[in-house]
Image (spheres, grey):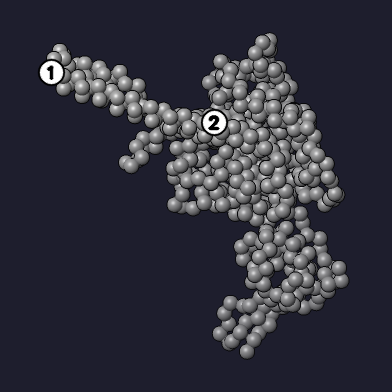
Amino acid sequence: MENIITSNTVSPTRTIPLPSGKPAVMPFDYSLLPPQIADFVHDTVQRQQCPPDFVAVSALSALAAVLGNKVWIYPKQFDNWKIIPNVWAILVAPPSSMKTPSIKAALEPLQAIEKGFKEAYEEECIQYKTDTIFAKVSLQAAENEAKRILKDKKEPNKENKAKEAIASANADEVDLPILNRIIVNDTTVEKFGDLLAQNKNGLFLVRDEVSGWLAKLAKEEYQADRAFYLECFDGDATFKVDRIMRGTIIIEHCTLSLLGGIQPSKLAPLVQSAVNGKNDDGLIQRLQLAVWPDTKKAWKWVDQAPNPIASQNYTDQFIKLHNYKPENKAHRFDNNAQQLFIAWMEEIQLKARDIDTPGIMSSYLLKLPKTITAIALIFHIILNDTGEGSSKNINTIGEEATAMALDWADYLISHFNRICSWANNSYIEAAKLIVRRRKKLPIPFKARDITNTGWAGMGSTNDIYNSLELLVDHNYLIEQQSVVGSTGGRPSRAFYWSSAVEDT
């Protein structure tokens, strides 16, 4: 026997509007970038019709990766607080939102630098073969001469002369060529450590889809890897790896910049894990350049060549940062810039310590000064002549670069706030998706029918039930629960669309 329990016996005639699951974010403003970068971003956005946020953040993280740890900034005039200008960035959006094309366009100059590394490496390999053969021949000739001396009974002091013959051989061990790297895509943590030791300026982890990397680090068996990567955010930590088989590897500067795309549904559980304390070690909050812009509805056909001037100016900045090797690596704010930073710093510290600021946001805000000062340093170098003969004090960061960097703060905070809110409210957007795609579901339907669709953004079974209960509460659905048998048990839950929805 089946007992039927219906949540509401009369089908409602009017739905209640669903709440918003995503707080508003600040739109990207091209004034956030120096013109050498802004022109390229604008041109790319016009042609690809992608969010400017994605191209701008990808460009900024790539520039930070090229600069690496070759320079730094002291945000205070006398204190030894030191900031390395590496940044961690993620692009948040549903699938097919132009994340990958944005990354690809922004990284083209960096790929060209890496191509140069490869060509130089191939030439060094040819020279290595020549030098190795020469060293072998030279050593063989020296050994033959030493044997001749030792066999000569008339040769006085022949042992010393034989040693001298061997020592005179041009047979020094030839160093194996090293392929210089900036970009890494997929690597074990052990190999990553090797690459960091070889590439002392730091590395740039780029993943079109970074969710797999983040999810892996959330697993218990990868907590040692997670701890190592967390150290790489600072950019200046020294790390020593001791292994029986591999010996000792000393990484003088653990410097990592990061860029990747991720879907909101895959980011939400990672943020929830940080909120509930399961993985509250600051990894999510280190994703400082995290942007989740609104999706543009309009689209039009555009077929035009890239702006050659904008492209060249953009490429020139990578060359400039790549070749920037000042004698004095330390930078500080000038007086006006320092006052700007102090005023902002006092404001952000108070906000982070406010009792009404959620813990995850507080942690994000406390890490924001590193990001803002890093951006100021990058912009300062771009905006100034760093060539020989320049009369400017390039080690003093001025008001223009500092003000531009500080403008990023409110913009980034608004986007991180959306990400944090999504972790708790993702079921709201999922409910809206269920309504939009309701005709693809059977009548009646159950939660498992939604799971079987494979729709992105649905989350766990519990999340789906939260979405369905929200739709019931807002008169979109009528729930029917049935218990089979006299002993009861867990009820089966089925859902019907109300007449109010069927008429829309």
* Image-quadrant location for residue 440: bottom right
Q: Residue at x 13, y 15 (%)?
A: 154
Which element type, helix, strand or loop, lies under badge 2?
helix
* Image quarter hosting the C terminus: bottom right
Look at the image and tell me whether residue 61 can be seen. no
Query: Can you name the residue that lies furthest to the left here?
Result: 153
Viewer-proximal residue, 273 or 72? 72
Q: Amino acid at mark 2?
A: Ala
Q: Is 254 in front, or is 20? A: 254
Kindly report the distance in space between the C-alpha atoms of the residues bearing marks 1 and 2. 51 Å
Mark 1 or 2: in front is: 1
Query: Where does label 2 land, which residue?
Result: 120
Q: Residue at x 77, y 39 (%)?
A: 44
Q: Identify the residue position indicated by label 1 in the image.
A: 153
Sequence-first disc among 1 and 2: 2
Which numbered circle lies on residue 196? none
